[in-house]
Each structure stands twice: as structure tokens, then as C-alpha cells.
Image (cartoon, rainbow, N blue to C red):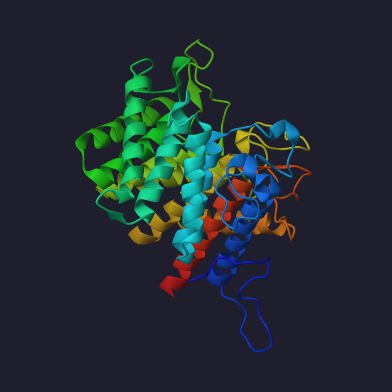
């Protein structure tokens, strides 16, 4: 297994006496470099403002930009940081090291601290992501008599119950609202994350209520937001109060959530049609939003500063795509060529534009980093490179 690196020098650098690294070793090293950049570029000497000691190797909380922008000092992006928890758990699972896991726990604690000690906010999709991050920690940590892993399961269950009590209603069809201020606006981010959270809670607890809601959330996606002919997922219903679908808001994020929900259902039922629908959505998404091999716009004109929620979208899609590739390989291997090819091409292009020693990303992966990189943008890159590392490790295991 690869281990976290103390410098930017890959641990598998070839020499005259050694053979070149395998693809699995190479991408594990690259994932380490991206994890290190997340720590050094978004922590640093101002980390004390965000709950991490200056110079701490595994500081938990992260700044909103690299370099620090004073206008962003107080910014708190709850759902971005939930993904920071997840990528650090990725590193821990890949490397077997406890350092990234400690960092993930600190990041998680920091979210709650900055949220005034509460798990909850006004956005139901945000809370779904934090619930998923809590489950990752629960899975990664040993549990003995309620400590330490159980507390994360308890948090995930509390978040789920809050979503049902405060956000689930029948407006536009039984489904989860986007936020407390718009209970009749239903979208893919909230219902996709909720479908995943419900399915994963069922897998861990076997409680029927979680399965019921997982199926209901997926049903809403498929009957209301998914185009049956193409598999593309519309962003939402009734955003402007006129009961229309946001058909022109086509984001990789939403497609990834739907693919992920289908894979969870497939893992539970082994129904081939679920994987076929996931593959259809993946193919259409790539052909529509990334025909050149990388996502370049997603309905947004990026300025020189970049940033924003959209910075995270493509990384979420790539994570789900890697899970789809794993599921396809386990079933029959049919249909693998296109999604696997996209995964490798897009992450190769991303890597080519990550300039050492900082390894900062751009919102568009075919372009080097802008003067300012937002945390969402960098997390998307880490998600993608960790997904590529998992893919290469699995390929190596099958040879």
C-alpha cells in the first residue's frame, strides 16, 4: 500500500536500479500529492483561524481559498467541508494510515463547531452530504461500546430524521425539498443525496424505514427529473414557483448522484436494469457535457477567479463513475470501455495541468490553475485522482 508522503517527491520515483512504477503505484503517489496540497495550500499559517494549529501535519479545518483572500476569511461552506471529510477518508482507506483519518475527524468536528455546535442548517442537500460523510467515518473507525465510530452513525441517523421531519413533503410528488425557505422546490441534489444516505443507512442498520425512503427518493428522481429517453437528470422542479422543470440546468453533479443511487439499488437487488440505466446516464452525460473528454462549462462562464459550488460538481460525477465501472466489472464487464476511457482521459488531462510544487486545480481541467483556487475546485480534483487511484488498484488486482 502507498503511504502518505512528507514531500512532493513521489515514493515510486524510478531510478537506474528500479523499474518504473506501475499505474496503481503512480496514481497512489499522485493522490498523495493532491492530499498534501490540500493540507499545505488550504491550511497553513492562518489555520488557527479555522481550528487547526499552524504547522500541524494533519490540521482538520481548511481555508476557502489558496492563497488566502481576505474576502473569504469568514466564508463557511458546510457541504464543501463534508467532501473534505470524504477525501481524507479516501486517503486513509487507500494508504492504511491513521493520519488522514484523524484529519477527517478534525474536519468533521470543525464543521459542527463553525455551525454553532449544530449538525443542521437550512439546506437539505448539505445535510445529506454531511450524513454521508458521517457514515464514511463510521465505517472507517472501529466501534467498541459506542466509541468512537458509533457517534458518527448516530449523527447520520439524526441528520436523516431531520431531513424527513423538516423537508419531506408531497409538493410536486413525495420528495425532499431543497431548503427550509422553499419547501415546494424539489431538486436532484437534495433527493439524490437523500437517496444515497437512506440506502446506506439501510445497508448498515437493516431498518425498513431507510429502505422505504431510499426507494421513494429514487422513484421521485426517475419519474420527475430523469428524461427516460436520454437518462439525463434535470436540476429541479418549481424553483421559480411556476411548476416548471429546470431542463436547461444540466450539471454533472446531478447525473453523478442519480448514478450513485442506481448503484446502491443494484447492490441491494442485483437487478441488471438498474446498471443499464446508470450506464445510459453516464454515456449521455459524457457525450453531452464532456464530448472532448473533460467537463468545460456546465452552463457557467468561469472568470479568472473560478470557484463556487460548481467547482465540486465534476469530481462528484467521477467518483460515481468509478463506482459504476466497479459494478460493471463485477457483473459482466460489458459496457466498460466508454466510462473507463473517460475516467482515464479526464484524470490524465487534469494531472497534466496540475503544476508542481503546489498542484492546484482549475475549474476547467484542461487549464492550469487561476491566481486563486477555491476549496471546492481543489476538492473536485482530489476526488477525481482518488477515484483514478482506486480504479488502477482494482485493475492491478485483476491481472
Using the image, determine if residue 36 lies above or below residue 288.
below
- At horizontal 21% and vertical 39% (from top left) the residue drawn is 207
Q: Quadrant of residue 222?
A: top left
Q: Quadrant of residue 288?
A: top right
368 sits left or right of 294 in the view: right
* Residue 350: x %, y % from top left: 66, 54
Residue lying at the far bottom of the rendered structure: 17
- At horizontal 59% and vertical 69% (from top left) the residue drawn is 26
Task: Work out whether residue 317 can be spotted.
Answer: no
265 sits left or right of 93 in the view: left
Task: Work out whether residue 379 can be spotted.
Answer: yes
Using the image, determine if residue 57 lies above or below residue 273.
below
143 sits left or right of 311 in the view: left
How many numbered circles are shown?
0
* Residue 192: x %, y % from top left: 42, 34
* Residue 265: x %, y % from top left: 31, 43
Using the image, determine if residue 203 lies above or below residue 304.
below
Looking at the picture, tell me which residue is in the foreground, 104 or 363: 104
Looking at the picture, tell me which residue is in the foreground, 334 or 149: 149
Question: Where's the C terminus, which quadrant?
Answer: bottom left
Looking at the picture, tell me which residue is in the foreground, 362 or 332: 362
Amino acid at each position: 500500500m502507498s503511504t502518505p508522503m512528507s514531500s512532493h517527491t513521489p515514493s515510486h520515483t524510478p531510478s537506474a536500479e528500479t523499474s518504473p512504477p506501475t499505474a496503481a503505484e503512480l496514481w497512489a503517489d499522485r493522490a498523495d500529492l493532491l492530499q498534501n496540497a490540500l493540507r499545505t495550500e488550504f491550511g497553513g499559517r492562518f489555520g488557527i483561524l479555522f481550528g487547526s494549529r499552524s504547522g500541524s501535519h494533519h490540521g482538520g479545518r481548511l481555508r476557502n481559498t489558496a492563497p488566502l483572500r481576505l474576502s473569504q476569511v469568514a466564508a463557511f461552506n458546510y457541504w464543501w467541508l463534508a467532501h473534505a471529510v470524504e477525501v481524507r477518508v479516501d486517503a486513509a482507506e487507500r494508504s492504511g494510515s491513521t493520519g488522514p483519518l484523524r484529519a477527517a475527524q478534525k474536519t468533521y468536528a470543525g464543521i459542527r463547531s463553525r455551525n454553532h455546535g449544530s449538525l443542521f442548517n437550512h439546506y437539505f442537500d448539505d445535510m445529506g452530504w454531511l450524513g454521508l460523510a458521517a457514515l464514511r467515518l463510521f465505517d472507517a473507525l472501529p466501534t467498541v461500546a459506542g466509541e468512537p465510530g458509533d457517534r458518527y452513525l448516530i449523527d447520520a441517523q439524526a441528520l436523516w430524521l431531520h431531513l424527513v421531519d423538516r423537508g419531506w413533503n408531497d409538493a410536486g410528488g413525495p420528495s425532499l425539498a431543497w431548503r427550509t425557505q422553499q419547501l415546494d422546490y424539489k431538486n436532484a441534489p437534495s433527493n439524490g443525496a437523500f437517496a444515497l444516505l437512506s440506502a446506506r443507512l439501510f445497508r448498515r442498520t437493516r431498518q425498513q424505514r431507510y429502505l422505504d425512503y431510499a426507494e421513494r427518493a429514487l422513484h421521485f428522481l426517475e419519474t420527475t427529473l430523469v428524461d427516460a429517453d436520454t437518462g439525463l437528470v434535470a436540476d429541479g422542479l418549481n424553483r421559480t414557483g411556476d411548476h416548471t422543470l429546470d431542463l436547461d440546468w444540466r450539471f454533472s453533479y446531478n447525473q453523478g448522484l442519480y448514478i450513485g443511487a442506481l448503484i446502491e439499488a443494484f447492490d441491494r437487488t442485483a437487478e441488471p436494469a438498474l446498471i443499464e440505466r446508470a450506464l445510459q446516464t453516464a454515456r449521455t452525460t459524457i457525450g453531452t457535457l464532456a464530448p472532448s473528454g473533460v467537463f468545460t462549462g456546465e452552463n457557467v462562464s468561469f472568470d479568472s477567479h473560478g470557484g463556487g459550488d460548481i467547482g465540486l460538481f465534476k469530481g462528484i460525477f467521477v467518483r460515481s463513475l468509478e463506482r459504476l465501472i466497479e459494478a460493471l466489472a463485477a457483473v459482466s464487464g460489458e459496457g466498460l470501455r466508454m466510462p473507463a476511457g473517460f475516467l482515464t482521459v479526464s484524470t490524465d488531462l487534469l494531472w497534466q495541468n496540475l503544476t508542481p510544487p503546489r498542484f492546484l486545480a482549475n475549474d476547467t481541467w484542461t487549464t492550469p490553475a487561476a491566481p486563486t483556487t477555491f476549496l471546492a475546485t481543489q476538492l473536485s480534483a482530489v476526488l477525481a485522482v482518488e477515484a483514478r487511484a482506486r480504479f488502477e488498484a482494482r485493475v492491478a488486482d485483476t491481472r
